[in-house]
Amino acid sequence: MMITFATAASLLATLAANAPAAIEQVAWMQGCWQMDAGPRVVEEQWMAPRGGVMLGMGRTVRDGTLVEYESVVLREQDGKLAYEAHPSGQPSAVFMASRIEESTVVFENPAHDFPQRVGYKRDGDSLLAWIEGAVNGKSRRVEFPYRRSACAGSSKSSR
């Protein structure tokens, strides 16, 4: 009986690993997220999955001044999820999902300078995002511990 269970578990794991990735697997990223670090505020916002795509945007503001921004297209590509980053002042880069779990996803691009990995892990109203890889032969990891925040609505414009 134990051999049958082990064989079935192995088969299920293989089938799951070979199943095409769907954007809905990372729908838990949607919403608005914010990290406050003294005078620095980092925000990230993800639209709900639609049409095989999630759109994300982020910005970093320090002392009321925009420091950097990024747009991301998270899409289904050849049975995998592709994280296409468009950071301010840098060329675009594509990272492919190497791990997708219930509340964790990791994207990799070993040929990219830094980072080589981008990850997200959700725990309730917290979202830990990180970038990591090697810089000059040394491992480096930068974390962004976000909390869920209200998405900014329309504001009255002054005319």
Image (cartoon, rainbow, N blue to C red):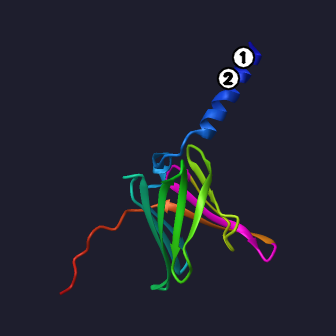
Residue 151 vertical placement versus 20 (above, below): below
Residue topped by disc 1: 4
Q: Residue at x 53, y 84 (%)?
A: 89
- Closest to the observer, 25 or 109: 109
Assess whether residue 131 is covered by the magenta stretch. Answer: yes
Q: Which residue is mark 2?
A: 8
Q: Residue at x 70, y 19 (%)?
A: 5
Residue located at (72% from left, 67% from top): 133
**Rendered view: 142 above or below 28:** below
Q: Is residue 96 left or right of residue 148?
A: right
Q: Position of residue 19 (x, y in %)?
A: 57, 39
Predominant SS along the magenta part: strand
Q: Position of residue 25 (x, y in %)?
A: 50, 46
Residue at figure coordinates x 50%, y 50% from the top left: 26
Q: State which region is magenta.
A: 122-137
Mark 2, secondary structure of its residue: helix
- Direction from residue 65 to residue 114 in the image, left or right: right
